[in-house]
Image: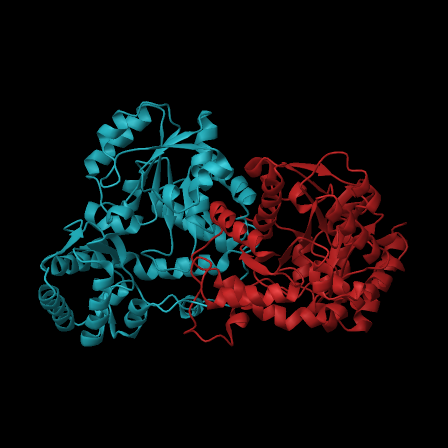
Chain colours: A red, B cyan
Amino acid sequence: MNKINPLLEAFQQTNFPVGGHGKRNIQVLIDALQDVDGQTDGDTYGNGKLIEDFQEEMAAFLGKESAVFFPSGTMAQQIALRIWCDHKGIKKVAYHPLSHLEIHEEDGLKELHHIQPILLGEKDRLIRLEDVLHIKEDIACLLLELPQREIGGQLPDYEELVQISAYCRSHGIKLHLDGARLYEILPYYQKSAREICELFDSVYISFYKGIGGIAGALLAGDETFTKQSKVWKRRHGGDLISLYPYILSASHYFKQRLNKMGQYYEEAIELAALYNQVPGVATTPSKPVTNMFHVHINRPKEQMESLLVNLYEATGVGLTHYLKEINETSCCYEVSIGDRYANVPKEELRKAFAWMESHLIENGV
Amino acid sequence: MNKINPLLEAFQQTNFPVGGHGKRNIQVLIDALQDVDGQTDGDTYGNGKLIEDFQEEMAAFLGKESAVFFPSGTMAQQIALRIWCDHKGIKKVAYHPLSHLEIHEEDGLKELHHIQPILLGEKDRLIRLEDVLHIKEDIACLLLELPQREIGGQLPDYEELVQISAYCRSHGIKLHLDGARLYEILPYYQKSAREICELFDSVYISFYKGIGGIAGALLAGDETFTKQSKVWKRRHGGDLISLYPYILSASHYFKQRLNKMGQYYEEAIELAALYNQVPGVATTPSKPVTNMFHVHINRPKEQMESLLVNLYEATGVGLTHYLKEINETSCCYEVSIGDRYANVPKEELRKAFAWMESHLIENGV
């Protein structure tokens, strides 16, 4: 059924894959269940100790009054925006041109909720305070994604965030946080999740990115907001009879990895520096502010694919399982640092980058 | 947090609960994983061998070209109706007044898809051929729920189904099957799933009712239909990065229980007969046509609650964990037969019904 993908196959054979936490296989679930008593009751349509306890724990972590577990962020965020639109009676919101809602959700926000997004800022940079100050239309909500994933995981300064938040509050605009990668930004800001979330009226977080759970998301805000979100969750078909496989894995890996975000962040800085030493290669941002960054290579995708396959076979180090074409002469990929990086011997990594550099030069960059 | 519910608590203490497969606790998931190799890759956004194989297996079982796994039936059915509405360019469908879409989904079909339902037939009976023949408005789709759960799991004759199907086909009306309990109807009809589904353009089945999985649903039809359903699944927020906890449990319990549906059906007939011998007690239907039925009791809810609590303590047999008030003088509950029934010794069951009869008479029915 599946087409053969030489880069993916070569990557899967490497001894030292560099990004992520590990394979997304069934073992992820089995491990999460290891310390769970089988006699524990599952959740039932959003009720029961298992889901309620976790929601309370996460609400406290985020410093919000209440929280609701969702099967997906796509569902949670559309619902958040819908609630704020209904609240104000205006079906307009603003977000970045490369927001998840705009490019990964088959226009669910428009097709299901008939909400019109105002695309704020530019595709290659963050939303700035001045963009917000110059919104011409009346909007119900501004969504900020921290970090902005599609541009390598960039972040505004904390002070700018505070100013955007203050402006929104004083102008009747709700501020929603796409915090799919919220944990990952805390080491850079040197703030707690509560301190960041204080700036926002509603917050979505994910459990399968930095946390490495199986799936699942959470929406937090005040009680009125989360109560309404449960009605919409049912309408969307997200109020499953049981969500516990996702809740248990979210809880397990949250405990395991929350305190490792600082380590991932420092490792990302270290790895990006290795990339940036190679001529024709550059990372965005040049110095990461989270555990992620994008790698841009001045080389056609197909050519780079062969080079990486050879690199993996020669060094045993796996840098990426895919490449995305930018144009005829360059390509890119995303790197997210997780548990795996610490298992890559520094010497092997150094050798891999030396190999890349010599072969890129050989082929005439 | 949770209020004390004496009937539920007494039920949970019984040695011989009569309905269902067992407790919905984490063990259900642990058991489903017992024979799974942890190194098996999970599914990724609807792709991968694990989900594709299961979808193909179920499509073959249902005799449909293609199938898509969904987190919930609520999501799957709204999407099915939306596709048929868009196909015909008419935002009207017809279904039973007590359809799941009408009473359990917070009006998702109306709020998200702006589809207007025509309520066909009456609350206390099945949709009949003559109801269909007399639909006055142009509709895109007719949804039939087999069995009709909210009236005790009743079924039309197979011949009537064939006639309804033929009428819809010849009048450009798509016929959709709410087959949440499809497996459960096969013993009565003495038909295969394929034979039933042949009458329908699209079919939804559930994996946590008779099958006893954790959650999850499947939508089947032709390729054009299922391909469109995947787009809507993403819009709804149902295209999770991984659905494998539900797929694995669905597959596990499907294999384990599919061939037991005939047994559950016969046991339901046996149990309903015991109920119907008790004065003031009657089942709907009087003779079950699936593994389920409703029990109606001519006794106020509160009074019956005390009586059942005493019955459970005296006999160790648990008949129901809840009661629903019909009016001031009567109440009801639903019974679904699963694995548990076979573990109830016939002698204990006989004693429980004798106890019920004597105490209902004592209290003056």
How far across and how far down the image is residue B333, in percent? 25, 56
Give the residue drawn at x 39%, y 59%.
Answer: B213
Task: Please provide percent x and percent y for residue A16.
Answer: 72, 68
Residue A180 visible in image: yes
Residue A163 is situated, as x and y percent measured from the top left of the image, at 81, 51
* Image-quadrant location for residue A157: bottom right
* Residue A355, above or below A178: below
Q: In the rendered image, is residue B44 in sight?
A: no
Seen from the viewer's position, the closer of residues B104 and B70 is B104
Work out whether B319 lies above or below B46: below
Q: Is residue A158 left or right of residue A54?
A: right
Residue A158: percent from left, percent from top: 81, 57
Image-based side of B136 in relation to A79, left or right: left
Closest to the observer, B220 or B1? B1
Of the pair B221 and B106, the residue shown nearer to us = B106
Instruction: Examine the image and state in which quarter residue B11 appears.
Output: bottom left
Q: Nearer the viewer, residue B337 or B328?
A: B328
Drawn side of residue A217 relative to residue A288, left or right: left
Residue at point 74%, 47% (across, down): A168
